[in-house]
Amino acid sequence: MNSSYTNVLNAAKDALSHQDFPLSCLYMVATPIGNLADITLRALNTLFICDFLACEDTRESKHLLTNYGIDKPSSSWIAVHQHNEAEQCPKIISLLSEGNRVAVLCDAGTPGISDPGAWLARAVSDAGFRVIPIPGVSSVTTLLSASGVVGHGGFDFVGFLPTKASERTSLLKLIDSQPKATVLLEAPHRIDTLASSISFMANRKVTIGRELTKQFEEIATLEASQISNWLKADGNRKRGEFVIVIHPSEAKHTVDTSSHEPLIKTLLEELSLKTTVKLAQQLTGAPKNELYALALKFSKHENS
């Protein structure tokens, strides 16, 4: 037990003693992506009270809970990973039907994003049981918050690219044609391949983050063509897990919105100008300011 976290665990119990943690629920618990101090009080209390823990890697999760002074019997641990998630769903549902609380943990971050948990959450929900998110750290939002990406239609999350070269190339070309920012994940043994694969994007801005929240965290914003040289400049830069944000292409910020005119006109018949622009932006991914100008033009026509 790590005694330095004893007071934190006690604080979590006190702070949440009057909150409701229902039985027969699946709890999707976000855990730190590297820095143990990033755990939330609510996550600590959830892990403490849950009867069973469905983990991507039980060894990693046992080590994590030991750091926080949480001890669970061996019967509480269930391995739920990418190779057996579907098979474990009936077991988890059975435990919930008996009134148990079950927590889902991946090795780091929020389960069900690029790690196991999504199939389990869907199966549990379809079976009529509640799925309760316990939010916390996500590597995706962690890097996005530091990337300086200005909203041009939000962002797309792709995660890990295909390993097959032709499929990877096709997907990257599609990403390059889109106006939105795109978030990728990559393992250290494939980062050189990724750097080479996106070099065709030339001067498009890319923010790369490694060892996020850890002691040797490094974040850099470069042009796509510079990433390979950046990695070669320091051998340590190929260590750790990577998150990559491909920024919106400056050249694609100005687009022809004329094809969106029918949509704008239809929405304006029933909705306010503000809501029309918001929905049109979500549906098309076109820049918000250009859709606003288009909607404003038609709104003026209607009022004239």
Image (cartoon, rainbow, N blue to C red):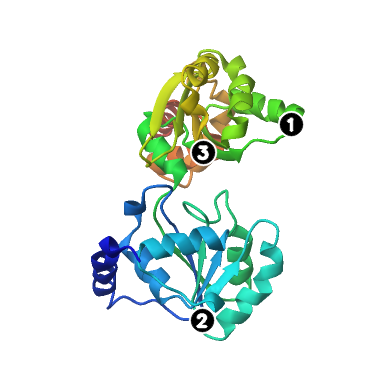
Q: Amino acid at mark 1?
A: Glu
Q: Residue at x 39, y 54 (%)?
A: 136
Residue mark closest to the camera, 3 vs 1? 3
Q: Is residue 231 left or right of residue 300?
A: right
The picture places residue 203, in percent across and down from the top left corner, at 51, 13
Q: Residue at x 60, y 28 (%)?
A: 175
Given residues 32 and 26, the one toward you in this image is 32
Q: Which residue is mark 3?
A: 241
**Dot 2: within a 10 Å radius of its alpha carbon, few (fewer than 14), some, or many (20 or more) residues?**
some
Q: Amino acid at mark 3?
A: Glu
The picture places residue 266, in percent across and down from the top left corner, at 54, 40
Q: Which residue is mark 1?
A: 167
Which element type, helix, strand or loop, lies under badge 2? loop
Q: Disc 3 versus disc 1: distance between alpha carbons? A: 22 Å
* Quadrant of res 198: top right
Which element type, helix, strand or loop, lies under badge 3? loop
The picture places residue 241, in percent across and down from the top left corner, at 51, 38
Q: Which residue is mark 2?
A: 100
Residue mark closest to the camera, 3 vs 2? 3
The answer to whether the residues at label 1 and label 2 have Cβ atoms under 8 Å apart is no
Q: Is residue 222 above or below residue 214?
A: above
Q: Residue at x 52, y 65 (%)?
A: 104
Instruction: Pick the quarter of the image with the C terminus.
Output: top left
Q: Is residue 242 left or right of residue 10?
A: right
**Dot 3: within a 10 Å radius of its alpha carbon, few (fewer than 14), some, or many (20 or more) residues?**
some
The picture places residue 113, in percent across and down from the top left corner, at 54, 51
Which element type, helix, strand or loop, lies under badge 1? helix
* Quadrant of res 303: top left
Q: Amino acid at mark 2?
A: Asn
